[in-house]
Amino acid sequence: MAFEITDAPITRGVLAKKANCHIETVRYYENIGLLLPPSRTEGGHRLYKIDDQRRLRFILRCRELGFNIDELRSLFSIVDTNTYTCGEIKSLSTDHLKSVRDKIKDLKRLEKTLSGILKNCTGGEIPECPIIDSLWAD
């Protein structure tokens, strides 16, 4: 997902295109404060400099790895101070990995349950369906 950072400031539309995301995605990250307000032209157009582009790339990479907005806020709260330690980042990342592993366990349980329900269904033309029966069961 990495995109090439340019030296020259670029507009929001160009940034979104380079990052392969929607312009609304860039706007959203600005609105919630993950992307800092960019500089503007005299006409009011946003211009994203190198640091803005890098920050968006960082956000998108984290999102690809499943970090949620609160986790990103936590990362930025320590990264933006420039006083973070590798141990702090490792701790946040370890917590995130645990969350990912918990989700995988939940998905495997869900898969097993759905597979069991589907196994009992013939998919026939009668109005009785073991899938519905299973979902209505106590």
Image (cartoon, rainbow, N blue to C red):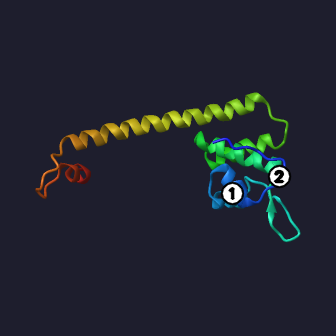
Residue 8 position in % (x across, y down): 84, 51
Q: Identify the disc placed on residue 49.
A: 2
Calculate the distance from the C-alpha at mark 2 to the C-alpha at mark 1. Answer: 14 Å
Q: Position of residue 51 (x, y in %)?
A: 82, 47
Which residue lies most toward the left here? 126
Extreme residue toward the bottom, this view:
43
Three-letter amino acid code at disc 1?
Val
Considering every residue shown, the one lying at the far top of the view is: 87
Q: Secondary structure at mark 1?
A: helix
Question: 10 Å neighbourhood of mark 1: few (<14), some, or many (≥20)?
Answer: some
Write the residue at 65% across / 48% down. 70
Mark sitting earlier along the chain (2/1): 1
Which residue was labeled with disc 1? 26
**Disc ID at residue 42:** none
Q: Disc 2 residue type?
A: Lys
Q: Residue 91 lies in what quarter of the image?
A: top right
Who's the residue at 59% across and 39% down the image?
Answer: 65
With respect to residue 57, does 86 lie above or below? above
SS of the residue under disc 2? loop
Q: Quadrant of residue 45?
A: bottom right
Please name the residue shown 13% across and 51% down the image.
Answer: 124
Q: Nearer the viewer, mark 2 or mark 1?
A: 2
Q: Quadrant of the N terminus?
A: top right
Q: Pointer 2 and pointer 1: residues touching (CB < 8 Å)?
A: no
Q: Relative to 7, does residue 30 appear above or below in the rendering?
A: below
User: Mark 2 Cα within 10 Å, few/some/many (few <14, many 20+)?
Assistant: some
